[in-house]
Image (spheres, rainbow, N blue to C red):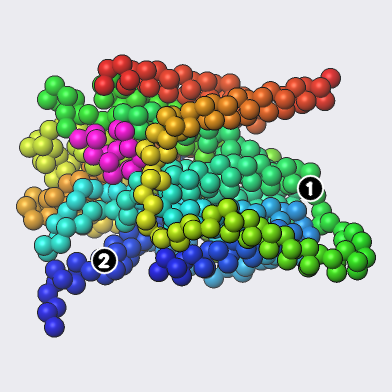
């Protein structure tokens, strides 16, 4: 059952990710990205990380992507035109992609040579309590630094928006 | 083969299928009749009678509406983006109806020797699941407005997505304070943490619970809930005097009905969550021996009133319909006294009556308040709701940390 669900949602994630690039219309791309995030959330859920799955849905699919879609609708962006860069780039794309995937799998293989296979349901530390405890004890410093970084980004955005208005 | 009831019911899949069917049937019927109740209540507030033609007191009106909506022509506007135009109502209704899966209606019950919870499934992230669903529901409305290729629909869709994103923040913050009191994200555990009484008579519901009574949180949550469901006074996405019908201007037939269903399902969800988080879920308002006699007494009082009105009929059919309904109410009152059914019916009665009162509040407000202007709506969200809910969360966290 777990394996069936994994392959189903992994396939949906990959197909949606390809769709993000293939689609011409920004709205279609944005919604395919929502599909990627939704299926990733299901994969987190299958691995036993309930809190991460919910956060993925609320923050990425529910807040950030809604904002994307909102902006696309507000600007009324139409379908994009194909740039037609010629056949050289198209021909180069496939070998480059294969090279990239090979490189990534090689690095993972070298980095974790004897990592055990993932077992569904083996990981149980993904509930809200465990994540909260980890954030506020072991990862307190990175957590606080990240929040300061986000605050800086917000202030930067406000400053930029103010300048536009004057 | 041993086919006794306990072993068949004990099978997880059989039990879940039965519960699913039951919950889906009750929910969909409620959604259909909620519209009848809304029309009746608004009519009586405005000194009209509401639907009366189809069936006694218009009680078959939802059925007639359903048939009408199913058989109407399904128009497809020529310039619409067809794929998203069809997808949008599906998204809206799917995410609105899935919310019922985590809502508990009562405690653990024992049916023919099988113990089960009156809930489809209990997640340890139940509250977060509901927040995620309400976040996804925005897509249905935003896409409907955009794909219609109509300026009114687009403005309606934009307004609604901005409004729902803005009000999600105070709603999530208002939700967080009862979670601090309960110390859990599972809706069942939150409701169970509110059982019992303080000083013997004050229920330990979150709105009364020491050390941090959640009355302000409850009010904030309900205001945000009105905005999240696009109801009056926050119904700007479908303001008919400026936007025709907003995001569903171009929709007809079953697609239109899906948006309606999604709106009512969201209302039911918001009211259930408010009941579970703030109003003690299925726990009664007074201690047990007295509380057990309230449901039959209420039903008998309602039945007596109906029979009394039947004896002085205001309209032609009242002398037949009113006594029939009255006798039905009195019989239902007796059902509450059957000891075998009491552990199921009493919690269900308290849960449904609390949800019902909140739903009535939604309808009452719709008949009473005018609509906000759009800048007022946004100003209210960011300059009032947000700071108040942040301060409320801080005060609650402080009190809980200090006194618990």
Give the alpha-carbon distance from disc 1 to disc 2, as whole Å.
49 Å
Horizontally, residue B154 falls left or right of residue B26, namely: right
Horizontally, residue B253 falls left or right of residue A69, namely: left
Q: Nearer the viewer, mark 1 or mark 2?
A: 2
Q: Which of B30/B18 is in front?
A: B18
Residue B183 is drawn in which quadrant? top left
* Residue at 54% from the left image edge and 54% from the top image edge: A112
| Number of numbered tags placed on the structure image | 2
Quarter of the image with the C terminus of chain A is top right
Horizontal and vertical percent for residue B77?
72, 63
Q: Is residue B183 magenta?
A: yes
Horizontal and vertical percent for residue A30?
69, 52
Which residue is tagged 1?
A76
Quarter of the image with the N terminus of chain A is bottom left
Which residue is tagged 2?
B12
The 10 Å Cα crowd at callout 2, few under 14, some 14 to 19, many 20 or more, is few
The span shown in magenta is: B182-195
Secondary structure state at the residue bearing disc 1: loop
Residue B184 visible: yes
* Residue at 32% from the left image edge and 37% from the top image edge: B184
Q: Which of A72/B181 is in front?
A: B181
The 10 Å Cα crowd at callout 1, few under 14, some 14 to 19, many 20 or more, is few
Horizontally, residue B327 falls left or right of residue B104, namely: left
Horizontally, residue B204 falls left or right of residue A28, namely: left
What subunit carries mark 1? A
- Residue B337 is labelled as none
Secondary structure state at the residue bearing disc 2: helix
Looking at the image, residue B298 lies above or below residue A89 = above
């Amino acid at each position: 059952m777990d394996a069936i669900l994994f392959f189903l949602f992994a396939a949906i994630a990959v197909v949606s990710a390809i769709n993000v690039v293939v689609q011409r219309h920004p709205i279609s791309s944005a919604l395919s990205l929502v599909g990627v995030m939704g299926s990733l959330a299901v994969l987190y859920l299958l691995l036993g990380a309930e809190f991460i799955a919910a956060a993925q849905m609320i923050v990425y699919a529910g807040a950030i992507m809604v904002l994307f879609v909102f902006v696309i609708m507000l600007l009324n962006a139409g379908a994009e035109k194909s740039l037609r860069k010629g056949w050289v780039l198209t021909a180069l794309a496939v070998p480059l992609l294969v090279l990239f995937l090979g490189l990534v799998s090689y690095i993972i293989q070298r980095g974790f040579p004897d990592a055990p296979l993932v077992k569904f349901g083996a990981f149980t530390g993904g509930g809200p309590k465990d994540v909260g405890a980890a954030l506020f004890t072991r990862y307190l410093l990175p957590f606080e630094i990240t929040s300061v970084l986000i605050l800086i980004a917000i202030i930067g955005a406000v400053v930029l928006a103010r300048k536009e208005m004057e | 083969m041993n086919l006794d009831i306990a072993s068949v019911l004990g099978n997880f899949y059989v039990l879940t299928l039965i519960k699913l069917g039951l919950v889906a049937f009750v929910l969909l019927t409620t959604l259909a009749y909620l519209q009848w109740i809304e029309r009746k209540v608004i009519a009586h507030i405005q000194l009209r009678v509401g639907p009366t033609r189809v069936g006694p007191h218009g009680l078959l009106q939802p059925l007639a509406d359903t048939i009408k909506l199913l058989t109407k022509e399904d128009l497809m506007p020529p310039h619409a983006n067809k794929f998203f135009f069809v997808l949008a109502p599906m998204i809206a209704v799917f995410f609105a109806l899935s919310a019922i899966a985590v809502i508990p209606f009562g405690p653990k019950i024992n049916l023919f020797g099988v113990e089960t919870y009156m809930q489809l499934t209990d997640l340890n992230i139940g509250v977060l699941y509901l927040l995620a669903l309400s976040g996804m529901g925005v897509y249905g409305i935003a896409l409907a407005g955009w794909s219609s290729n109509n300026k009114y629909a687009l403005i309606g869709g934009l307004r609604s997505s901005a409004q729902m994103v803005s009000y999600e923040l105070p709603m999530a913050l208002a939700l967080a304070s009862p979670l601090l009191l309960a110390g859990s994200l599972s809706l069942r555990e939150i409701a169970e943490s509110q059982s019992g009484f303080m000083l013997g008579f004050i229920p330990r519901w979150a709105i009364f619970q020491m050390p941090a009574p959640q009355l302000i949180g409850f009010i904030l949550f309900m205001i945000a809930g009105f905005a999240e469901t696009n109801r009056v006074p926050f119904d700007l996405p479908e303001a008919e005097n400026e936007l025709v019908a907003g995001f569903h201007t171009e929709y007809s037939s079953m697609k239109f009905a899906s948006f309606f269903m999604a709106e009512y399902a969201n209302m039911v969800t918001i009211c259930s969550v408010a009941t579970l988080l703030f109003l003690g879920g299925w726990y009664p308002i007074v201690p047990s021996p007295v509380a057990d006699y309230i449901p039959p007494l209420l039903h008998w009082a309602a039945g007596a009133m109906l029979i009394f009105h039947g004896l002085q009929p205001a309209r032609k059919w009242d002398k037949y319909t009113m006594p029939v309904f009255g006798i039905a109410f009195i019989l239902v009152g007796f059902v509450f006294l059957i000891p075998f059914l009491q552990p199921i019916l009493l919690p269900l009665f308290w849960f449904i009556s609390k949800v019902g009162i909140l739903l009535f509040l939604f309808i009452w407000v719709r008949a009473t308040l005018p609509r906000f202007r759009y800048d007022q709506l946004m100003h209210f969200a960011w300059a009032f709701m947000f700071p108040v809910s942040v301060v409320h969360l801080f005060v609650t966290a402080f009190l809980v940390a200090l006194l618990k």
